[in-house]
Image (cartoon, rainbow, N blue to C red):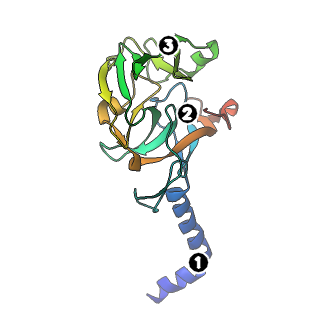
Amino acid sequence: MLKIKNLIVQNKGFLFFLCGMIIVRSAVADWYGVPSSSMYPTLLIGDRIVSNRLAYDVKIPFTDVIVKRIADPQRGDIVTFISPEDGNRLVKRLIGLPGDMIEMRNERLIVNGIEASYAPAAADAATHLAPDYRGQQLVLKEQLLGRQRRIIVTPQRTAMRSFGPVVVPEGEYLMLGDNRDNSKDSRYIGFVKRELLTGQVKRVVFSLDTDRYFLPRIERFGISLL
């Protein structure tokens, strides 16, 4: 016991720093490495992102208990959250707000009766195809209710391309991945309660190309996702 006390005394500065970092990650901001292609072409495997945990709510550290609401999530936000299915941390696009009626018909998204418009994305988007799929990938610009984003669809892949209409319950949200045919999102895990939201992602901090010996993708350093 004496050895443990001495060890704590000798390293108290480091221990305070470590505890502070853990609390910051739990309550203020957390950082993630993007591990999958579910958000291509927006987020690439190897991107490092920061999730602002204070974007929407103040929570008691290490819990999902909300003590103060700061702002309401908005349709189109990129958010991090805890999966209601298995507790894994996920990052997706928020598509449906409480009370929204959402449906999809043959890959075309419809929100509150308004159908999104689609057009081929700019040529540079072709450089952000998902590396884990060799079939046809179409990069499209999806525009709906004043917001636009780039998505990928893969016509040759088996996927859920139609669902609903469903009404998003009060206090919950509907999430979709930008890589529409390769994303485990609300089509499979259900709606996400507000207390499971862990933050908002607005920027890529830096990026490493895992297919090229982790060389830095300099052009992605600090890019905005808005």
Which structural element holds mark 3?
strand
Sequence order check, earlier mark of 1 and 3: 1
Badge 2: few (under 14), some or many (20 or more) residues near its Cα, within 10 Å? Answer: few
- Pinpoint residue 129: horizontal percent, then vertical percent: 52, 20
Instruction: Kindly indicate whether the residue at mark 2 contacts the one at mark 3 (C-beta within 8 angstroms).
Output: no
**Label 1 vs label 3: CA separation?**
58 Å
- The C terminus: image quadrant: top right
Q: Is residue 50 above or below residue 11?
A: above
For the question of whether residue 15 can be seen, the reply is: yes
- Pinpoint residue 203: horizontal percent, then vertical percent: 62, 38
- What residue is shown with label 3? 117
- What residue is shown with label 2? 210
Q: Is residue 198 above or below residue 219?
A: below
- Pinpoint residue 186: horizontal percent, then vertical percent: 35, 33
Circle nearer the viewer, 1 or 3:
3
Residue type at mark 1 is Lys
Which structural element holds mark 2?
loop
Instruction: Kindly indicate whether the residue at mark 1 contacts the one at mark 2 (C-beta within 8 angstroms).
Output: no
- What residue is shown with label 1? 12
Sequence order check, earlier mark of 3 and 2: 3
Circle nearer the viewer, 2 or 1:
1
Q: Which residue is painted at 30% across and 23% down in the image? A: 165
Residue type at mark 2 is Thr
Asked where in the image residue 95 lies, by quadrant, the reply is top left
Question: Camera-side residue: 96 or 99?
Answer: 99
| 165 to the left or right of 131 | left
Which structural element holds mark 1?
helix
